[in-house]
Amino acid sequence: MGDLTRRAALAVGASAALAALSACATPVAVGETTTSTGPAPQPTMPDAPPPIAVEAGPPPAVPPQGAPSIAKVPAPSGTIDRLPGEGSLLAWTIDDGTDAAVIAAYAAFAAATGIRLTMFVTGTYFAWDENVGTLAPLIASGQVQLANHTWSHPDLTTLDDAGIADELQRTHDFIGESFGVDARPYFRPPFGFHDERVDAVAAGLGYTVPTLWYGSLSDSAELPPEKIVELANQWFLPQHIIIGHLNWKPVTTVFDQLRSIIVDRGLTTVTLNDVFSSQYHP
């Protein structure tokens, strides 16, 4: 698919066309003589109008998105991969956090545009510690939500019950101590791998909503920016939960294009807490 970009309407100036004027001569019959009284008077050429100045300025600014006004529904107990009902909402979620600069770039993008994000924290990465102050005002306002993506990103189905609990509890404690919020009830099992046993252990800690996705930017590994835009064109659709990653810089170079897709499609970004109510976030 081609990139969806905002197009500015440019004013087009009209050019003034001047008609060529010629003098009219009186026809002379053969054999007649004429008396010349001098050259025929020439018409006066009008002054050409001044050119119209056309300034092609930047595209009109799109105002930042405000907080959505939507009626919440109770958070389900069980797996979700999209938002409920029909509408024009988009849950843009982002995982991991290996690169502090990428986290900071997402935070700056959100602050400038009002885009709402849910970040799934992998607690072992120091990039989160480096961005506590950067993220704090966005988290306090509810524009950015933090959720649990385990401590060290293992396949939870390969761990015993104690190991599953430790992975979720350590990141739960880290988020609470560093950012002052409760990440429950949403956790994202690494690689999307979970089963009834994993879900039961997680639910015992208050993480009752395994959160998967319905479309991906596929940037857990490094991708060319144009591929990321292509995938956004494919998956940025109403009521989808989209997954991206806080690991590689190419996505930060196409934020404007990704936002244009959202704006052009009339989508409103939301956090999970915007859509669902729970005992932790009424």
Image (cartoon, rainbow, N blue to C red):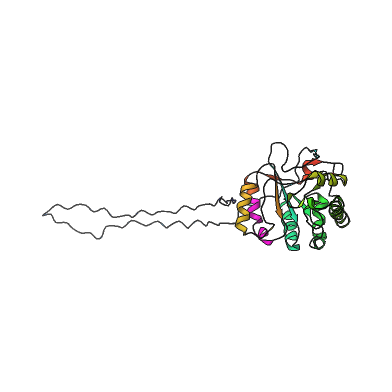
Residue 175 place in picture, x, y as percent: 85, 55
Residue 129 appearing in the image: yes
Q: Is residue 48 left or right of residue 229?
A: left
Residue 193 place in picture, x, y as percent: 75, 49
113 and 262: which is toward the camera: 262
Q: Picture quarter containing residue 279?
A: top right
Q: Main secondary structure of the magenta part?
A: helix
Tell me what residue is drawn at x 85 percent, y 46 percent. 201
Residue 119 place in picture, x, y as percent: 77, 52
Q: Is residue 258 magenta?
A: yes
- Total residue callouts: 0
Q: Is residue 10 left or right of residue 159?
A: left
23 and 133: which is toward the camera: 133
Q: Is residue 62 magenta?
A: no
Residue 61 appearing in the image: no
271 and 63: which is toward the camera: 271
Quadrant location of the C terminus? top right
Q: Picture quarter containing residue 204?
A: top right
Q: Range of the magenta residues?
A: 246-260
Tell me what residue is drawn at x 62 percent, y 46 percent. 264
Residue 110 place in picture, x, y as percent: 73, 54
151 w.r.t. 90: above or below:
below
